[in-house]
Amino acid sequence: MDIDFDNLINLQNLDEEIKETTLILDKIPSQMKGIEIQIDAQSQAVSRAKDKLAQNQKNRRTLETEIQDIKAQIDKYKHQSTGVKTNKEYTALLKEIKDAQSKIDQKEEEIISEMLEADDIGEEIQKAESRANAAKEKLTKEKDTLIFKKKEIEEKKAELTQKKESLIPLIPKEQSRLYLEIFKKKSGIALSAVTDDFCSMCQIRIRPQMLNELKAETQIILCENCGRILYWKKKTYK
């Protein structure tokens, strides 16, 4: 019985294309996730800068409250000073007032430092937002391109799968059945061309008698080493 190598090889070519499209499609989810991670990273940079500003403002409010408390304490000391009866008590109150005022001066310096830092943080936020917006625009375009590519590849895979389904009935059942069995066992490669007397898949030399039988193309011949269907490469196939 003649072997339908033309269609078997066409079937193998279709399966290889389907495998390639499947590999591309399998990578797309991780690529999409990578883009989302990059977009999120830029957003987080903006959030961190804004959190720093919020903490800065909280620190300033805390310092301002502490200053008000100290001022209230100074007022209390001044009120007490009007009723003291000895110089020692009066001197002690003056020292308390002086120490309290020193604390106010220190905290006011801290407020100025926080205000200067707030200006720096404001610039940091602007830069982070600018980078985030530019990155988001770029990455969104990449995402849209990837979505379009995914659609194209899915359509191509569907077309290839349809061709395969249409081709299989054209091949003698025993030959297509054997092809599909080997296809499942051998990672999607059921055929192997013989070039220069060697199996192209496992590189084992083909015996002379087997070569003659192979060239006759009257029976299926499997590689004695890798178990794939052999075909003679010198003939030009579609």
Image (cartoon, rainbow, N blue to C red):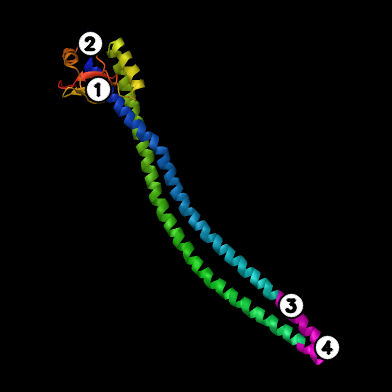
Q: Position of residue 224 (x, y in %)?
A: 26, 18
Label at residue 219: 2
Amino acid type for the residue under numbered disc 1: Ser
Camera-side residue of 228 and 59: 228
What is the C-alpha distance between the residues marked 2 and 3?
106 Å
Query: CA gap, disc 3 to disc 4?
Result: 19 Å
The residue stretch that appears in magenta: 69-91
Q: Earlier in the sequence, mark 2 or mark 3?
A: 3
Left or right: where 24 falls relative to 91: left
Disc 4 is placed on an element classified as loop
Mark 2 or 4, which is nearer the eye? 2
Which residue carries the number 3 mark? Answer: 72
Image side of residue 164 versus residue 31, left or right: left
Residue located beneath label 4 in the image: 84
In the rendered structure, which disc, 4 or 1, sits on the residue that comes first in sequence?
4
The mark closer to the camera, 1 or 3, is 1
Q: Are the residues tagged 2 and 1 within 8 Å (C-beta)?
A: no
Q: Do the CB atoms of the residues marked 1 and 3 lie less than 8 Å apart? A: no
Which numbered disc flags the more N-terminal residue, 1 or 3?
3
Q: CA distance from mark 1 to mark 3?
A: 94 Å
Task: Point out residue 137 in the picture as x, y percentages from the top left corner.
Answer: 40, 51
| Vertical comparison of 19 with 120: above or below | above
Q: Which residue is mark 1?
A: 192
The three-letter amino acid code for the residue at tag 4 is Val
Q: Residue furthest top?
A: 1
